Image: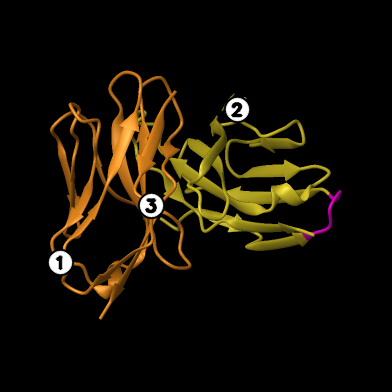
Chain colours: A orange, B yellow
Amino acid sequence: GNSVTQMEGPVTLSEEAFLTINCTYTATGYPSLFWYVQYPGEGLQLLLKATKADDKGSNKGFEATYRKETTSFHLEKGSVQVSDSAVYFCALTSPGNTPLVFGKGTRLSVIA
Amino acid sequence: DTGVSQNPRHKITKRGQNVTFRCDPISEHNRLYWYRQTLGQGPEFLTYFQNEAQLEKSRLLSDRFSAERPKGSFSTLEIQRTEQGDSAMYLCASSPDRGFNEKLFFGSGTQLSVL
């Protein structure tokens, strides 16, 4: 079945540091890949997505590239801000009305 | 849009009691999903509806869990004879029916505590 593995947290960075959160997946067929973010006290919201191999999703300075050869979708940001402190979830879904499957989440704390 | 609304935000109950949660999706969204999230874990899929039809319910955790969406609008999730292990955040999400890779809009969740 479909599954997602993402790096354990928490991750603590100083403001303006480079961020990478690793995500690898197992899926049948050709899945779509997502990063969702949960800010403190709020519901999950979509950060970015990619629907086919070599696609790059981007939003708010975050990027992730769909790498089929390594089954990965790592999240990156060149310069994090305190406001990026949140929990980040990697997720996937695949054709055939399969449900969205999430990783365990990675908590990011950015300190000034 | 007004967003996905879930009520109540918090529910404290005693073991053995029944609880019901409500979800109001974004009005034009055909699909409605229920997830459960425990501490330190990602959301775990429970069930989903397309309009009033429940298309997947095999992931409901036990026969104590049931969900309805009687008129294709709001949905309820009921847990009968609650157990301490049911303590978790219950999340609702909705989406338009545009294919499997459409993004989900999540509510803020109902936090259940079973004493």
Q: On the rendered structure, is B84 left or right of B33? A: right
In the rendered structure, the residue with mark 1 lies on which chain? A
Q: Which residues are magenta?
A: B13-17
Three-letter code, disc 1 = Ser
Q: Which residue is denoted by mark 3 in the rendering? A: A8
**Residues at marks 3 and 1, common chain?**
yes
Position of A67 relative to A108 (above/below): above
Residue in front for this viewpoint, A8 or B108: A8
Residue A28 locus on image (x, y percent)? 35, 19
Q: Which residue is denoted by mark 2 in the rendering? A: B54
Q: For the residues carrying marks 3 and 1, which lies nearer the camera in this image?
A: 3
Three-letter code, disc 3 = Glu
Q: CA distance from mark 3 to mark 1?
A: 21 Å
- Image quadrant in which you'd find residue A66: top left
Q: Residue at x 62, y 57 (%)?
A: B110
In the rendered structure, the residue with mark 2 lies on which chain? B
Label 2: which secondary element: strand
- Residue A79: image tag: 1
Q: CA distance from mark 2 to mark 1?
A: 44 Å
Q: On the rendered structure, is A86 left or right of B16? A: left
Label 1: which secondary element: loop
Residue in front for this viewpoint, A5 or A35: A5
Quadrant in which the C terminus of chain A is drawn: bottom left
Label 3: which secondary element: loop
Q: On the rendered structure, is B51 left or right of A66? A: right
Q: Residue at x 30, y 27 (%)?
A: A31
- Residue B101: image tag: none
Q: For the residues carrying marks 2 and 1, which lies nearer the camera in this image?
A: 1
